[in-house]
Amino acid sequence: MAQYREPTPAEIQEQKLYLEMGLTESEYEQVVELLGRLPNYTETGLFGVMWSEHCSYKNSKPLLKRFPTEGKQVLMGPGEGAGVVDIGDGLGIAFKMESHNHPSAVEPFQGAATGVGGILRDVYSMGARPIALLNSLRFGELTEARVRQLFKEAVAGMAWYGNGTGVPTVGGEVYFDERYTNNPLVNAMCVGLVRHDRICRGLAQGEGNPVLYVGGDTGRDGIEGATFASAEFSDADEPKHSVAIGNPETGRALLEACLELIELPGLIGIQDMGAAGLTSSSAEMASKGGSGIELNLDLVPQREIGMTPYEMMLSESQERMLLVVEKGTEDQFAEVCQKYGLTCAVIGRVTADGQLRLLHQGRTAAEVPIAALTTAAPVYQRSAREPESYRINQSLAVTDIPVDDVAETLKQLLAVPSIASKGWIYQQFDYQAGGQTLVAPGADAAVIRIPGTKKAVAITADCNARYLELDPKVGGAIAVAEAARNLVCTGAKPLAVTDNLNFGSPENPEVFWQLEQAVEGISAACVKLDCPVVSGNVSLYNETNGQPIYPTPVIGMVGLIEDADQILPNHYQEAGDLIVLLGCSKAELGGSQLQKLVEGSLKGRPPALDLDYEKRLQQAVLAAVKGGLLRSAHDLSDGGLAVAVLESAFGTGLGIDLNFSQDLSVSAALFGESQSRIVVSINPNQLEALQALAAEHQIDLTVLGAVTAADQARIVYNQQVIIDCAISELETVWKDGIACLMSS
């Protein structure tokens, strides 16, 4: 067998091998200039992953600076494994969202599973115990067998890893559209609980302090994963080795071990070996600590024989952490790891020379300045061009989409997988693990109790990409507003945001314009609603053969409920209660589910959003919750009013009898998706108090009708009976929307 030989620096240059390693021609020339010489194979690989979009944000960094990131509630903003917000009593909530889109398109089970594993590590590396997982998923239409298989495997992978680590998966969202057929989106979110005095950072400081490797062994899985996640797909098969392999049993052991290690006084810094593995964790920790790191790769635990420095440094094998500890405390850390059956190896030391130095088999395999890998990474000011489609849509207000049979149209909408019950998905998750889940999946937001207190946190993830396709600035703001409304509907005060910006190639001026506009909209809404962005992720190049996905900036948000006894249900509570609409309905059908169902395409302006009105609505609802005025609340979103009032009835055995009038078409009134609207139910005795509160906050209030004890959904609009059918029939259609397709 021929001995393996890496290409020489001259061969890398002459054969332009750096192009296959993620560097452009100009970037390679910049590396040569920074080093003052040609980089060797391992060094070229280090720059390839560290300068990828996934690690350096080189295309998005100028835009991310526009986000509001500060507030009195913020304990830790962007830059660490997760953001942290204060919830009082010396406690904080750490949370973050990450993407595993490209891996999930290739190996959906492991791609999605390791997405969960990675986001868990991001959170507990902050010193926080994970208390909840959520997900945001986008797939093609479930009528396609390949899409069904991808979707089935991705959900199974997320459930396998989450359930295996004992962390409840309590919520999320999923949309289906042909634009995601070749580029599914798998975004995972984790929320953790941390004491203020135990918040950790990824720092390497103190010359001579040891660098500890903790967790599973390093293999060849996941090599170049960060580079892979920063490239566009083509019709060619993607490399399977770019997808890492997870082990939830090891993941759970590492979680518990790290939470114990964090209590040791000798800990200086800790960081997950996530994207770009040992390269990013060592370089980023040294960069944040203003130091250097020397690693002896002979000491790296390996599960495969003959691994090269390139392979070890770029491997994304799962369940691994890098720690820096005070010299002389190594044995204490090793003892804890041994208790959990985990490897703990001293693989290097902190230096004062600002270099990342790699030793291997008695030679220096690589030596590059930390700053060259991190702060010197290129930053691009991409051109933005407003697409012609945007100008056309802005000139078109869609006020009516006539339908022949309103009841039949309602049934069709309820069966649309993006609207239908997500029970097929969340029934695969152990959402009661840990015993603190107060509101399970299926509501506007999940709610988790904070042990030892009266408090609870509400959590949600949201984004309507159809709106962003028509107007990315308005759509971005709506994503924030709707996430906040979801929390408010449980009685929670929104606190802060994590985002996952999923877009096509930033090198396409129209895509970059979408990204820029979405950031503007998100920022404006975050400022108005006092919800700073404390963490997040950017996933670009989500396109195949030049066809991008819809712009999809998913918003994850957490909110605080001071008294868990005041959690507001999503569903009606009692026959005789009034059903009331808070907020104003308008003739807005652009980008709606009805438009997609009837016309098969999107056009026109999306719903308008008045952020001042939105803020007043949310304040009014929270005041109503505090005053004990509401029996239930549910945000109006996909499918509009008719869908929302029915969703609040499903599963209760109760019916609805609505009788109201508006100056709108039937389609706009029942299926329009106007913003800043919440349907609440109240005891009739509380109507006067709620009307006074609405007037005080200058928001509209419409009494729609009442909750009934009958198995009937009756809607009279402008004195005409529009819908009159059994609730149970509609509920069956809604429940079977995804389940029937997945069984075909």
Image: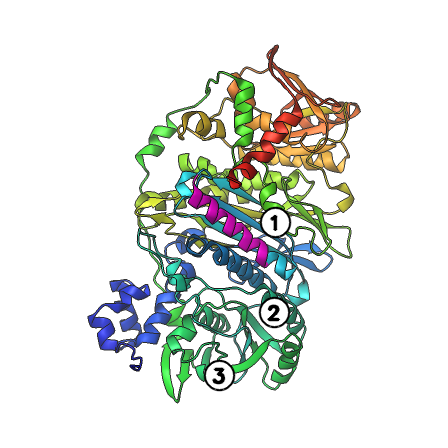
Crowding near the residue tagged with mark 1, few <14, some 14–19, many ≥20 C-alpha atoms within 10 Å = some
Name the residue that disc number 3 marks. Answer: 299
> Which corner quadrant of the image does residue 17 belong to?
bottom left
Name the residue that disc number 2 marks. Answer: 254
Answer with mark 3 or mark 2, whichever residue precedes in sequence. Answer: 2
Count of numbered circles on the image:
3
Task: For residue 529, say whether it is visible.
Answer: no
Disc number for residue 67: none
* Residue mark closest to the camera, 1 vs 3: 1
The majority secondary structure of the magenta stretch comes to helix
Q: What residue is at 49 percent from the left and 25 percent from the top?
A: 588
Q: Residue furthest front?
A: 744
Task: Give the secondary structure at mark 1.
Answer: loop
Answer with mark 1 or mark 3, whichever residue precedes in sequence. Answer: 3
Q: Residue furthest bottom?
A: 362
Range covered by the magenta-colored residues: 144-161
Disc number for residue 428: 1
- For the N terminus, give its image quadrant: bottom left
Residue 508 in the figure: left or right of residue 289: left
* Residue mark closest to the camera, 1 vs 2: 1
Marks 1/2: CA–CA distance: 24 Å
Marks 1/3: CA–CA distance: 40 Å
Marks 3/2 in contact by CB < 8 Å: the verdict is no
x, y percentage for residue 48? Answer: 35, 66
Q: What residue is at 33 percent from the left and 38 percent from the top?
A: 386
Three-letter amino acid code of the residue under disc 1: Gln
x, y percentage for residue 339? Answer: 67, 77
Answer with mark 1 or mark 2, whichever residue precedes in sequence. Answer: 2
